[in-house]
Image (cartoon, rainbow, N blue to C red):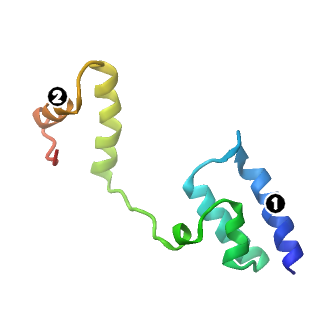
Amino acid sequence: MPGAAVGACCALRCTLWCDGKLLSQIHLRRAVVILQERYRASERLASRVGQHRSTQRHPGKVVDLEESKLWRRLPEIAADQIRWGCRMAYRMLRGEGWTLNQ
């Protein structure tokens, strides 16, 4: 069955590949899990998709809603005030009511 897993690994890599890179870490994690479950591939073989084994074992970071809103707001500030640095953006966010560390 290792031959089928290797073929599946190559096929899955081709379907998820976009301009020389896999789309994101989420897609890489999902690809490794699919190979392990569907084709009973070992972790070592499934990691040939491009995801390092230690990264696969590490749990993903869970981002809360407030933090995601903050991360969406930062590029808006940077686009509006091009010459501002991180300190001025920090002051503006504090003025808007955000509580955060610098």
Q: Position of residue 22 (x, y in %)?
A: 66, 50
Q: Is residue 77 left or right of residue 24?
A: left
Percent of width and height locating residue 101: 16, 48
Disc 1 marks a residue whose amino acid type is Cys
Give whichever of discs 1 and 2 has the lower sequence position: 1
Disc 2 residue type (three-letter): Met
Q: Quadrant of the N terminus?
A: bottom right
Residue that label 1 marks: 10
Residue at 23 percent of width and 27 percent of height:
85
The residues tagged by marks 1 and 2 sit, at their Cα atoms, a distance apart of: 48 Å
Question: Which residue in the protein does label 2 denote?
Answer: 88
Image vertical order of residue 14 relative to residue 29, above or below? above
53 shown above or below 78: below
In x, y percent, where is residue 95? 10, 32
- What is the secondary structure assignment of the residue under circle 2? helix
Q: Is residue 47 left or right of residue 61?
A: right
Q: Secondary structure at mark 1?
A: helix
Name the image quarter holding residue 82. Answer: top left
- Examine the rendered structure and indicate whether residue 87 appears above or below residue 66: above
The picture quadrant where one finds residue 38 is: bottom right
Q: Is residue 7 left or right of residue 76?
A: right
